[in-house]
Image (cartoon, rainbow, N blue to C red):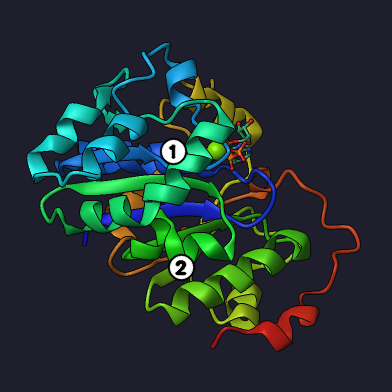
Amino acid sequence: MSLICFASGKGAPGVTLTALGFAAARANAGRRVVLLEADKSGGTLAVRYQLPRQPGLITLAAAGRHGLSRDEIWNHAQELPGGLAAIVAPEREDRTSATLRSDGQRLGRWLDDISDIEVIADCGRIDSDALTSGVPSQADTVYLLARPTAEEIQPAAALAAAALDRGISVSWVLVGDRPHDPSEIASVTGVPVASVLPDDRRAAQALLEGRADGRGKRNRLQRAITALATEGADAPTTVEIADSVANEHSDADPAPLASLAGESVR
Ligand SMILES: Nc1ncnc2c1ncn2[C@@H]1O[C@H](COP(=O)(O)OP(=O)(O)OP(=O)(O)O)[C@@H](O)[C@H]1O
Ligand SMILES: [Mg+2]
């Protein structure tokens, strides 16, 4: 197993942050890991870390058209601060989406075939086409990020169904546990919950900026992502959320998940 995709169906629940933290935790655990930016809305890492735009997704896709050998992957990766290897995408939406459309499936297949390197892909917000002809179509595992609201779960549940149809293992990574709790999401959608991350904007911001958040060296969000990366990949486990700071979003008048019942994927 070597291609693990993070994606969402709606909103911006934290796909990029979670993929980055997951990849870093796997690398720290001693695995050979590459983070791949495969979000059709464009990359963010090169801008954020002031890296050159190439090498990256574009050079990898171009090389892939003529056949690649496995060690060539490193020619297209750059080092992020902290040492994680990343294949960056251009920030321009048109270039990235065109490349993923023309080369995504082939690249996904090639990346998945490299057995001793784990590729962790930030696929951003996806649609069902991505699961038939994009990078995620070749994934071993897709983690779908969503806040547990009907608005975010509903579109993502349809994606989960499409992934399962293709034999791709899929599970939820929920951000917060309100208004709908994880067991309800799992039973209504038929998709297991791999992790429940604290919904904590301050911790997320601290992680993005690579600093402690003032509440401890490794904040609870980082611990939850690390637990998913080091324990949850093979046998999904739910990470307990300890207290109310885990939820920043109101649970007043939640839209019912019952409306999803007809879309249960199992
Ligand atoms: N677990 C979390 N709790 C609260 N806020 C979060 C969490 N994870 C990320 N965020 C915040 O949400 C915002 C978006 O994060 P991120 O860029 O990782 O999301 P995304 O799903 O990749 O969004 P986009 O669609 O813009 O690529 C950031 O401001 C980040 O700090
Ligand atoms: Mg993102």
Could you tell me which quadrant the C terminus lies in?
bottom right
Res. 264 visible in picture: yes
Up-down relation of residue 148 to residue 76 (above or below): below
* Viewer-nearest residue: 214 or 177: 177
Up-down relation of residue 148 to residue 167 (above or below): above
Amino acid type at circle 1 is Gln
- The numbered dot on residue 86 is none
Query: Which is nearer the N-term, disc 2 or disc 1?
Result: 2
Up-down relation of residue 22 to residue 151 (above or below): above
Point out residue 132 in the picture as x, y percentages from the top left corner.
Answer: 46, 68
Tell me which residue sits at (52%, 25%) in the image: 91
Point out residue 11 in the picture as x, y percentages from the top left corner.
Answer: 69, 48
Q: For residue 237, which quarter of the picture?
A: bottom left
Q: Using a 10 Å C-alpha cutoff, classify the residue at mark 2 as few (fewer than 14 neighbours), some (14 to 19) or many (20 or more).
A: some
Could you tell me which quadrant the N terminus lies in?
bottom left
Point out residue 131 in the picture as x, y percentages from the top left corner.
Answer: 47, 65
Please state if 249 lies on the left or on the right of 114 as rendered.
right
- For label 1, the residue is 222
Q: Is mark 2 within 8 Å of ligand 1?
A: no
Q: For residue 9, which quarter of the picture?
A: bottom right
Q: For residue 58, which quarter of the picture?
A: top left
Q: In the orientation shown, which residue stands out farthest toward the right? A: 253
Give the alpha-carbon distance from disc 2 to disc 1, as whole Å. 32 Å
Label 2: state its secondary structure: helix
Amino acid type at circle 2 is Thr
Tell me which residue sits at (49%, 17%) in the image: 47
Point out residue 178 in the picture as x, y percentages from the top left corner.
Answer: 72, 59
- The numbered dot on residue 132 is 2
**Ligand 1 is in which quadrant of the figure?**
top right
Please state if 226 lies on the left or on the right of 18 as rendered.
left
